[in-house]
Image (spheres, grey):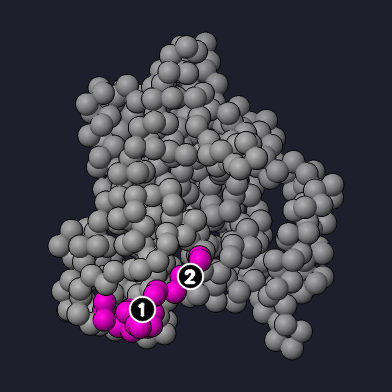
């Protein structure tokens, strides 16, 4: 992000130190940079002050929770945030409280929450208007898939009715706006700088508050709202929550499910820029999520969806690395209704379908071995060349160039690293 120098005698580190020590508002003197001109000036200046705080030398290696907590007991990096599993509930309860945060940070969070909520309402209204013309009832659209599976791309290709897109400078369509996704909340936090660890937990907190606002809005509209939810949905409880929501609000579910080989997910995550607001899951997390996704997929298709009693549209798309790697999202399975109106799963490609589901211990072992095999491979020029040949369309020169450039940055001939090592290091960055 663009850095500005404050006018006056105080240096940036001195301003940051004063802000941290005295907990007082330090005015940022200077012009608003281009990347903050589209937001209210009061919020922009909060972002600028917090950038100064985060980017100062004294805070370079400090967990950013220490900078925005009111209570001093939470300002010890050795004690907070809790790292153990039992501490996650404590973390949620603590940071969900408005009294935890310094007022300026809370104001920035509230701005992001309100913006995301308004975007979601705008998307819903646009989709319902289009759906009514097509005779489609209110729908919960969900995008399922592991990290870097291509869910956003699939969303754009699905061409959902009434979908709203960001407009690029050249007038073309960018990513959709308004889906309920934790990553969308991170954008507002990233404007002010900060560590990936904090922003991940903080944006999840914001998403919980957005979900509450959204549930109230749907209730006020008697369920006549459509929405797009973008997350991995790798646990069956996540699917069950969506089903319960659909049952309570009288809506249908449209599930666009994307499956990719583990290596495609791993490479996609490695290609994410260090320090970016995108998640950087460690190897073991990525592996467990990969296997859990396939188990959840089997359970929802064979039991959870058919037993739900609600209207469900389902499409499974897979990366056809078996026959044609150019086919990145091939339709492999879908639901259809039989003469009695029951949901029946139609399998279009048996081989790819079996690569996408976990139905027994044998398939679980196969998927774990696949992930471990990928994780143990050294990232060399041969590895990169082999990946491009097997998993990319040779005509897609731009993607091949980007992959080669991105992965070659990890190569140190004197200290080669495995895929797992790179993922773990990036997760800590």
Spot the residue most to the front: 8
Residue 8, numbered circle: 1
Sort mark 1 into few (<14), some (14-19) or many (20+) by Cα contacts within 10 Å.
few
Residue 3, numbered circle: 2
Q: Position of residue 234 (x, y in %)?
A: 46, 50
Q: Position of residue 199 (x, y in %)?
A: 38, 63
Q: Residue at x 23, y 82 (%)?
A: 21
In this view of the protein, which residue sits in the foreground, 52 or 404?
Answer: 52
Q: Compared with residue 403, is residue 227 higher up or lower down, i.e. above or below?
A: above
Q: Residue at x 72, y 82 (%)?
A: 412
Q: Compared with residue 10, is residue 332 higher up or lower down, i.e. above or below?
A: above
Q: Is residue 12 magenta?
A: yes
Q: Examine the rendering and report whether any part of residue 376 can be seen.
A: no
Q: Earlier in the sequence, mark 1 or mark 2?
A: 2
Q: Residue at x 56, y 69 (%)?
A: 274
Q: Compared with residue 426, is residue 249 higher up or lower down, i.e. above or below?
A: above
């Amino acid at each position: 992000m663009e850095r500005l120098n404050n006018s006056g005698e105080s240096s940036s580190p001195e301003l940051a130190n004063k802000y941290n020590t005295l907990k007082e508002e330090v005015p940022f003197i200077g012009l608003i940079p281009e990347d903050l001109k589209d937001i209210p000036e009061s919020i922009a200046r909060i972002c600028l002050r917090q950038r100064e705080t985060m980017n100062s030398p004294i805070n370079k290696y400090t967990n950013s929770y220490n900078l925005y907590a009111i209570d001093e007991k939470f300002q010890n990096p050795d004690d907070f945030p809790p790292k153990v599993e039992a501490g996650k509930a404590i973390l949620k309860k603590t940071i969900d409280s408005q009294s935890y945060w310094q007022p300026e940070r809370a104001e920035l969070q509230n701005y992001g929450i309100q913006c995301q909520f308004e975007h979601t309402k705008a998307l819903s209204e646009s989709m319902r208007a289009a759906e009514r013309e097509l005779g489609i009832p209110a729908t919960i659209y969900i995008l399922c898939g592991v990290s870097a599976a291509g869910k956003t791309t699939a969303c754009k290709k699905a061409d959902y009715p009434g979908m709203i897109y960001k407009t690029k400078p050249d007038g073309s369509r960018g990513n959709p706006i308004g889906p309920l996704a934790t990553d969308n909340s991170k954008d507002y936090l990233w404007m002010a700088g900060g560590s990936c660890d904090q922003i991940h937990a903080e944006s999840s907190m914001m998403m919980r508050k957005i979900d509450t606002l959204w549930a109230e809005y749907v209730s006020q509209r008697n369920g006549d709202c459509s929405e797009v939810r973008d997350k991995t949905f790798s646990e069956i409880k996540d699917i069950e929550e969506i089903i319960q929501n659909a049952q309570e609000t009288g809506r249908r579910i449209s599930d666009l499910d994307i499956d990719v080989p583990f290596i495609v997910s791993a490479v996609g995550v490695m290609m994410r820029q260090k320090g970016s607001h995108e998640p950087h899951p460690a190897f073991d997390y990525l592996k467990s999520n990969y296997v859990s996704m396939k188990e959840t997929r089997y359970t929802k298709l064979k039991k959870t969806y058919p037993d739900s009693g609600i209207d469900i549209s389902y499409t499974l798309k897979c990366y056809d690395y078996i026959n044609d790697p150019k086919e990145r999202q091939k339709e492999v399975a879908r639901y259809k209704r039989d003469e009695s109106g029951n949901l029946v799963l139609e399998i279009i490609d048996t081989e790819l379908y079996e690569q996408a589901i976990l139905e027994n211990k044998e398939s679980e072992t196969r998927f774990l071995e696949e992930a471990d095999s990928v994780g143990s491979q050294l990232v060399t020029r041969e590895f990169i060349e082999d990946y491009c040949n097997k998993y990319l369309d040779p005509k897609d020169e731009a993607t091949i160039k980007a992959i080669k450039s991105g992965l070659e940055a990890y190569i140190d001939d004197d200290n080669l690293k495995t895929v797992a090592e790179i993922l773990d290091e990036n997760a800590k960055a």
